[in-house]
Image (spheres, coloured by chain):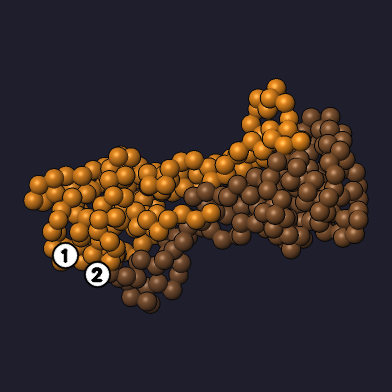
Chain colours: A brown, B orange
Amino acid sequence: MKLPSSTEWVLHCATTLAQLEPGATASTAQLAEYFDLPAPYLAKQLKYLVRAGVLTATTGPRGGFRLARPAAEITLLQIVEAVDGASSPYECREIRQQGRGALPPEDCRNTCLLAARMNEAHEAWRGTLAAQTLAGVLADLPPSAPDHTRRVIAAITPARRG
Amino acid sequence: MKLPSSTEWVLHCATTLAQLEPGATASTAQLAEYFDLPAPYLAKQLKYLVRAGVLTATTGPRGGFRLARPAAEITLLQIVEAVDGASSPYECREIRQQGRGALPPEDCRNTCLLAARMNEAHEAWRGTLAAQTLAGVLADLPPSAPDHTRRVIAAITPARRG
């Protein structure tokens, strides 16, 4: 059970964008160079964040990405599920209904007891990440972090924006 | 982020073994036929449960598997982690230390703030499953379930035991 490396990318990119001046943007090229990530694949992930309403993409010569909402209103769960989906890692294939021990369909109208417990665990995972916002992450960064982040982003040519 | 189908297998097999008479066993062949699963691959998963101390394997003509401990002392977490491991699905590859925005090593002595939050979510997931025992699952089964389970297991030839 592994999340892809792009989960780390989007969490860090969103945290970086949350540190920019209000209204400022960063392009895919800037974020890719900031973290030394492959720009084409990162671009795809950032599009997922736009689709989920986490980021806004602006076009034009000064275009790029910025948070679509205040950092206090963006949860880590929204970021993670934008790229990884919301389904439970446990997939119930209803083996209770197959083989010699198969239960009759009328005994399987409710969710399998084991699947229900696995889903409950997934909801606990989701609940933890839903309770964490980008603003909370920023509050735990060193006070010097936003200045450093802004300076580094500004020093990177924003070529191939968007 | 997906768990393999074998996670469902081991949860159901452990639940089945928990319903047998005290001391009774079921073989790989019986459990495979009970759920219509591929016996060789199931055998491998059951070995992981033995290694983790969830099941005991007995040899000989009446050999097979039984719970290694009372059902009240076996958690769903122990079963799941026996086959899937205990590591967090989030893998921090320390991208905070790479690229133009790389933080100096002295700023990275502590776990990344984002990885810490992802690990916290994983601990919530683990905590939920650690609080669920096989005895708890059994308590939620229909009262007729153990009799049915025992009858079906007994009707399957225990060939290729172990």
The image quarter containing residue A100 is bottom left
Q: Position of residue A85 (x, y in %)?
A: 61, 60
Q: Nearest the camera: A25 or A135? A: A25
Is B76 on the left or on the right of A31, as rendered? left
Which chain is indicated by disc 2? A
Q: Amino acid at mark 1?
A: Ile
- Residue A100's disc number: 2
> Which residue is labeled 1 in the image?
B156
| Extreme residue toward the top, this view | B106
| Extreme residue toward the left, this view | B61
- Residue B92's disc number: none
Q: Position of residue B117 (x, y in %)?
A: 64, 40
Q: Residue at x 48, y 57 (%)?
A: A90
Q: Is residue A110 above or below residue B112?
A: below
Q: Residue at x 72, y 40 (%)?
A: A35
Q: Residues within 10 Å of mark 2 (few under 14, many from 20)?
A: some
Which chain is indicated by disc 1? B
Q: Amino acid at mark 2?
A: Arg
* Residue B15 in view: no
Q: Residue at x 63, y 49 (%)?
A: A6
Q: Residue at x 79, y 36 (%)?
A: A139
Q: Is residue B116 above or below residue B2?
A: above
